[in-house]
Image (spheres, helix red, strand yellow):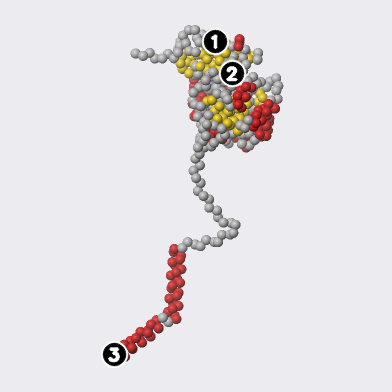
Amino acid sequence: MKKFLVLLILLAGVFFGLKKWSPHTLERVQFWKKKTTEVAQNQTLPPAEPAPVPGNETKITPVPKSTAISVDKTAQVVVLMYHRVEPPTNTTGALNIPPDQFEQQMQTIKDRGLAVISMQDFLAWRRGEKNIPQRSVLITIDDGYVSAFDTARPILKKFAYPWTCFVYTKFIGTGGKSISWEQLGQLRDEGVEIGCHTISHINLRDARNKTPDAYTQWLRDEVISSKQIIEQKLGVKCAAFAYPEGRYNSHVLELVKEAGYAAAFTAYGQRVTHSAPFDRIGRYAWNVRRPQDMAQAFAFNGPVEAGTEQPDLSEPAAATSVTQPLEGETITDDRPILKANLATLGELDPASVGLRLSGIGIIPCKFDPATSIIEARPGQPLTPGEYTVTVSAKAGGKRIETQWRFKFAPAPKTQ
């Protein structure tokens, strides 16, 4: 009886088990299993990407490495300065260079393997962002004569040389031999750097007939407002400045810095190094009377400006007088040595060279034609105040003059 009951219970379990897993039950199990799988996939897997089209696969751009470079600070630059490039006439003057001679000089640059760089390349090198060749050349043309556009430009294009055009705004668009704003715009579009050469092209050290306040305002217009005019007219950032006649004083240097110029150029011929002061970068100027200056530039054997020191007065200057005392300097010596390099004035008649000091008159001086250095010393002590040194001479039969100023203030007496 017990065996029969156990068998009956087993049969009942098999029956109910078979009934539970009927075809309908299996269908329901498969349905919920499929749903569960779909929900899991939607929650954990990203959307499927379409298969790439052959030949149109997405390229992975690698993350660039640092762009910092080690700039070669041993490189040197010579900066060339021209004015007019015109056939010779009776009115062109010493700063004019005939087109064939200008082209010959551009060929000399190429023949000597010198690299002509742009102003922007030069500034990038100075900022430590770009290297330049060991011996590089900057070409600049001053003032804004139309010959820069009509004559120099085609020659420079022939050699594929970049260049900088320094203009003074008062001259632009006045007709005759002046360049126009439209032509400057075309130069800009061709990649020529447009630099500032003030408004009126007047010696910035000349404060005569001006009160101190009027002189300061005039300087601000010449140095800062001129930059703004160029930037507004041409829609550019004016980064470079050239001193008229290469002349400046401490006040001018302050305004150049305030204006935000990246470089300011004098007219003192020198090889420019990486550490040369940004506001006193020298240039070799073409002058009919001193062709040796350009020859020195091409040979890279002239004086070197490597720091903030004033150039050695024993070195020949290209187009500006280097003086002692310096322009605007205050000294305490009551019998100072008055000294200047007159190379900028051209080939002088030694017998015609003379020096005067305001309040005293003519002072005996020595002039060395080989170095173009003039030197003198007052025969009597100076009294406190401001003094003007006037040097006069003859060059090519014409009388010329140059001036500079300084102040004498005795040193305070110690107790």
Reading the image, the residue beneath label 3 is 2
Q: Is residue 219 above or below residue 187?
A: above
Residue 359: x %, y % from top left? 51, 9
Q: Is residue 169 above or below residue 336?
A: below
Figure quadrant of residue 236: top right
Number of marks in the rendered image: 3
Reading the image, the residue beneath label 2 is 343
Task: Specify the amino acid type for callout 2.
Answer: Ala
Query: Horizontally, is 343 left or right of 331 in the view?
Result: right
Q: Kindly state the secondary structure of the residue where label 3 is placed.
A: helix
Mark pair 1, 3: CA separation: 150 Å
Q: Is residue 365 visible?
A: yes
Q: Kindly state the secondary structure of the residue where label 2 is placed.
A: helix
Q: Residues within 10 Å of mark 1 (few under 14, many from 20)?
A: some
Q: Residues within 10 Å of mark 3 (few under 14, many from 20)?
A: few
Are circles 1 and 2 on residues that touch, CB within 8 Å? no
Q: Earlier in the sequence, mark 1 or mark 2?
A: 2
Residue 368: x %, y % from top left? 57, 13
Residue 254: x %, y % from top left? 49, 26
Are circles 1 and 3 on residues that touch, CB within 8 Å? no
Nearer to the camera, 374 or 325: 374
Q: Identify which residue is drawn at 57% across, 16% down.
A: 371
Task: Specify the amino acid type for callout 3.
Answer: Lys
Reading the image, the residue beneath label 1 is 365
Task: Specify the amino acid type for callout 1.
Answer: Cys
